[in-house]
Structure formats: structure tokens, C-alpha cells
Image (cartoon, rainbow, N blue to C red):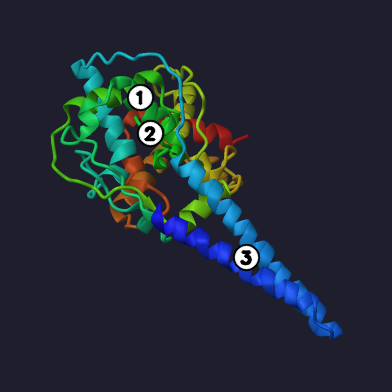
Amino acid sequence: MFGIIVGILIFVLAVVCFGWITIKAAKARQGWSKWLGIALAGLFTMVFVLLAIVSVVGIYKLYRHNTVSMTEVIVAGTPDQIAIGEHLAQVLCASCHSLNDDLPLSGGENLSEDAGLPLGDIYAPNLTPATDLKDWPNTDLFRVIRTGVDDGGRATAMTSIVGVHALSDEDILAVIAYLRQSPTVENETPEFKPTILMALFAGASLIPMDVPATVSVVSSPPVAATREYGKYVFTFMDCASCHGLKLDGNVPPPYPAGPDIRKYFSHWSKDNFLNVVHAFAVSAQPGDVMPWKDISKMDEVELEALYLYLHEVSSK
């Protein structure tokens, strides 16, 4: 917070300086220097005014208290539910909340470094019972997974994890069941400390920070190798963020345009798809945009269902 405030003060100081220069230029006698000075100094004044305003909006979004209403949830904690939750945690959570992309979820690296931008300290926290997470009610755990809002009402980095929000109620309860009994690992991650750049991104809505007022019910099709279940897998894996809903690579800002993959899935067989997934998972390198290792962690039913959905969309 202190760094962001200093950044805003610098913006305000720049506004004052360039505003003063604009006024001085307006009083100048020479015609060309007068209007050039007004144009340039006035432009910089407006730019820094905009930066200051966007930064303030960003601070508000990053630290405001969000109230998200939802009813109490009950976690059965049966062996089957825990097993499902463990699988989902492996596929969806380990890449951020683990240093080795594996369970347990003992805390990850700085997401700012992964983004390649100086956004501050944004560490995926330790989710094992070693932290105060063990004292959170099930309702708070459900809320942060579905909306990204923590037990204190602050919007966390989870607000931008669109795919996880699409998990069904049953699958979120399964993840909670796993977290409740996962191995305990002592690992304290640094507190959230955003930079002025992250405040600017949040204020300009380049980082999703909006949360719903209530939590609605989300269901999923029966687990089976079907096109319907494949669409559900496609959604919680957040494939559309890069490839678009039509797989043509057209995605809304701030996401960059991804590759058009229709030409592959329109003629690939299921075996082609599975071979590609497992081959690239072996050769995947840190920093790869495509999460081949995460995709390869899905079971046969999920992969076959995903293939059926992708093949159908690509053939249209």
C-alpha cells in the first residue's frame, strides 16, 4: 500500500509541475513556442491526471470490502469426495499453489514473476492445514474458490481465475474436503503487496477484480465421455481465455489473441489428441503458455469428453 501511495503522490506532483508549465506557456509571447508548450505540457498534465485517477480506483478495487451473500455449505468428507477433490486440486490448483506443480498445495512462487511484470508480491498461499485456513468455515472456503473473495472480504488474485469459478458446487465441496485433510506443510508465503503498476492494471480493469453480490448454484453434467461433460471440462480449464469460445483465437481484451485450433480438431482422432497431450507434457518447459502438464493430469474420461467437445465445435 505504501508504495502505491508514493506512486500516486508522484503522479500528483507531476500534474502540478506540468500544470504550472502549461500556465507559464500560456503566458508566453512567442506564438509557436507558446502553443507548442501548451500542447505538450497540457498533454502530460492530462496523462498524469488520468494515471492518478486510475491508480486511486485501483487501490479501491484491491482493498475494498466485498460482501458476497451465500448460504451455509456442508462438506461430507467421504473418501470418494476427498478423492475427487484431490484430483481437481492436482489439475487446477497445483500449478499455482505448489513450487513443483504437485500436491500438497504448500504455496507457490510469486505470480508477478510468472507474469513477467513488476506487479508486486502476489504469492499463491499455502493451502494446507498448517495455515489459518484450517479455521476458515466451509462457507468462506467455498466463497474464495467461487468468487476469489477471502474471509476478510478482500478480492484476491483468485478473482481472475475464471475457470475455477466455473466448477460445480459439488466439485468445489470436493476440493474443500481434500484441503481439510491434506498433508500439513509449514511454509509461510509473503503477504500481498501490490505495486503501482498493479493498481493501474486493476483500475483500468485489465485485471478482473469485480465480484458477484451473491453466489448462485452451479451444476455439471454427469461425469462421462460425452460432449456435454467435455464442455464443462473446457470451461473449468478456461480454454476460452486463449482460444475463444469458437476455438478461433478471438478473445476479448485484456487477453491476447490465441492460436486458431479448429484446423487440428476438425480432423484429429481421439488418439491423435491424446498422443499430442502426453508428448507435449513430457517436453513442456517452464514459461510455456500452453499448460500441457496440467492437461495431462486429467483422467481418461475428462480427456475424451474434452476431445469430443473440441471436435464438435471445430467441425461447425
Q: Secondary structure at mark 2?
A: helix
* Residue position for label 1: 142
Q: CA distance from mark 3 to mark 2?
A: 55 Å
Helix, strand or loop for disc 1:
helix
Pointer 3 local density, CA inside 10 Å: few below 14, some 14–19, many at least 20? many
Q: Position of residue 257 (x, y in %)?
A: 57, 52
Q: Earlier in the sequence, mark 2 or mark 1?
A: 1
**Numbered label attached to residue 219:** none
- Residue 303: image tag: 2
Q: Nearer the viewer, mark 3 or mark 2?
A: 3
Whole-number angstrom distance, CA of label 2 to CA of label 1: 26 Å
Three-letter code for the amino acid on which mark 1 is drawn: Phe
Q: Is residue 306 visible?
A: no
Q: Tell me which residue sits at (24%, 31%) in the image.
A: 133
Q: Residue at x 19, y 46 (%)?
A: 188
Q: Is residue 143 left or right of residue 262?
A: left
Query: From this viewpoint, is residue 203 visible?
Result: yes
Name the kind of residue labelled 3 in the image.
Answer: Val
Residue 15 got which mark? 3
Regarding mark 3 in the picture, which secondary structure is present there? helix
Query: Spatial distance from mark 3 to mark 1, Cα to Cα?
Result: 44 Å
| Labels 3 & 1 near each other (Cβ < 8 A) | no
Depth check, front residue: 31 or 186: 31
Q: Earlier in the sequence, mark 3 or mark 1?
A: 3
Q: Amino acid at mark 2?
A: Leu
Q: Position of residue 149 (x, y in %)?
A: 41, 32
Does 102 appear above or below 27?
A: above
Residue furthest to the right: 31
Q: Is residue 5 left or right of residue 100?
A: right
